Structures are given as structure tokens and as C-alpha cells.
Image: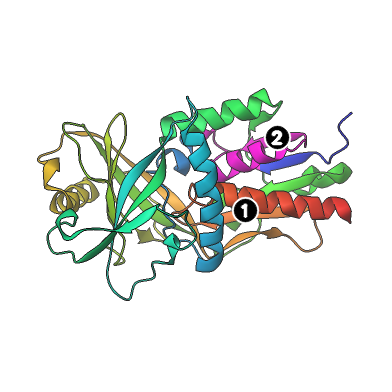
Amino acid sequence: MNTLQPITVLGAGISGLTTAVRLIESGHPVRILAKEPPEQTASAVAAAIWFPYEAEPVEQANRWSAKSFRTFQKLAGLPGTGVRMMDFLVLTRSGMDNSWKDELPDGAVRPARPEELPTGYEMGYIAKVPLAETQIYLPYLMERFRKAGGELVVQEVKDVESLLQGGRIIVNCTGLGSRELFGDETVYPIRGQVVKVKKTRPVQSMVDSMNKGRLAYIIERSDCIVLGGTDYDNDYNRKPTQADTDTILARCRQLEERLGAPVVLQALAGLRPKRPAIRCEKEEGRNIIHNYGHGGAGFTVSWGCADEVRAAIILIARQ
């Protein structure tokens, strides 16, 4: 008979799903309550390449990212996960914080050669990093959760006190929902738009995130090329705009001339949940563990933060 505390995970985005998988595979009875199913969350819109973008504090984010990196490496060797390792060009300049690379395995990162850089850039790193193709990876996590005995219930939660009855533990992975549900006014959206275009020839996947308001990235997936993006603070618009599509196409064509005149397949927008620091900790006085505010690094820190949640639950059990 299972004697571990039952756990309710709130939210079915990447943080909620990953945490639920980690906990249920550790022996806890787990259910997920979520306002939206995984395919309707911001996580489904994400480019989902490993890179700690807009994640703070940097030192902790790098540690969680490195732990996730190693888990994704293992998943990349398994069929049906939607995860693979790929070369990713991170454009940067002298004086920028490039500490994201410091805890990665030996050989994972090297300086880019001059001929590998787009026109006008002087510095970059080629990193072999995980890419999680969301249309495969999110269903993979959901199936893994269900096979372990987990249940997902799609319903909006407006009060958590009743969920704490009987020694239950809540893990809050609601992202922006934490603003209303838990009164956290420090969490806010960074609106991101992506444009999916048709694959016609190989391109170099890359990112330039050096300047606020000038974010640009190219991610080659198996079914398309994802171009991005936008980084608008406190913008709640979940619908893509033609103006943003035009801006994204122009920036990305400057970075990668092999894009040519890309055929647009779809434009999507999502809201990244950002706060001054990722909240991954137990709440004082209640059996609630928070795991949200990951900015643009939800996938990147997902397994590291899930392990942090599991460690917090072990401490609760010992009390």
C-alpha cells in the first residue's frame, strides 16, 4: 500500500508535467489539475530548445539547466521522446554573461569560427544542446505520467485550501496563474511570438538574445523551422500579429540568408511567466511547493526544478 503523501500538481505546462512525472515515478500518488490541457498551454508554443533565456537568479538557473541538460541527453537516445541533440549557435559579445555554458559537460560547447558567424557578428558559441519538439515531447510526458497511474483533470482551481486536506501536498506550476491564485504580483508575462515556416534547405539554428526588444532565433525542427521572436513585457495578447510576423521574418533573414523567402505555415503567440527570481521552494506554513516564474527557460530548467521540488517533498516527509 502506498503510504507517501498524495500530491496535487497545479498546471499542465512543461513545469507541471515534468514535476508530475518525477514525483509519480518516485512513488507518490499524483494528479494534475489544470485550467488547460498541455496542448493549449504556452509550453506548446515554445521553441523548446535548451537555453536559459530570461531566467534568474543566474547561478541557480544555470545549475537547474545543467541538471536538465543531462536528463535531456538521456531522453535524446530514446525513441518517441521528440528530443534530439543539435548544434546551436549562441551569438554574443565580449562582456556578456555567458555563464550558461560553464556547468555543461566537456565538449558540449566551443567558440564559433569567424566563418560560422552571420555578417556583423564577431563572437559566438556552438553548443550541442537538446531540442524538445513540443508536438511529440508534451504527449510523451503525458503518456509517461498516465502509464505510471497519474490522472489529469482539466478544471480551473480558484481556491487551494480544500486541496490541502488530509495531508495532501500541492505543487504550484501555474505560471502566470500564480498572480491571481497565490497573490504574487511580481510575476508578469513576456509575450513571445513565433512563426513556423516551411523547410526547404538546411539552416543554422541560432539565437541573438543580447538586446531587449531585438530577440531573434532560428530553430530547425523535423517538421518545420521555428522563427522568433518577441519579448514584450506585460503584454497579455495571446494572438499573433502580422506586424510581429513581418519583424520576425526580417530579423531572421538577416541572420540566416539560406532562409530565402520563407513560406509561412503558422504564427503563434504565448506568454512566458517571468518574475525577478524563479520561485522553486516550499511556502512557509503550508504544504505548498511553488515552481514557476521560469521566464523563457521553462523547458531548460524543467528537470532541475522538478528535482528541487522532489527534495522539498522529502523534507516535508521527514518533519
- In the image, 162 versus 288, the foreground residue is 288
Residue 243 coordinates in the image, percent (x, y): 20, 50
As helix, strand or loop, the secondary structure at mark 2 comes to loop
The label number, if any, that marks residue 25 in the structure image? 2
The label number, if any, that marks residue 291 in the structure image? 1
Judged by depth in the image, the label closer to the viewer, 2 or 1, is 2
- In the image, 111 versus 299, the foreground residue is 111
- In the image, 43 versus 303, the foreground residue is 303
Furthest-bottom residue in view? Answer: 95
Split into 4 quadrants, where in the image is the C terminus? bottom right
Disc 1: CA contacts within 10 A as few (<14), some (14-19) or many (>=20) = many
Q: Is residue 106 left or right of residue 196?
A: right
Q: Quadrant of residue 143?
A: top right
Res. 141 in view: yes
Residue 118 coordinates in the image, percent (x, y): 16, 56
Amino acid type shown at disc 1: Asn
Q: Earlier in the sequence, mark 2 or mark 1?
A: 2
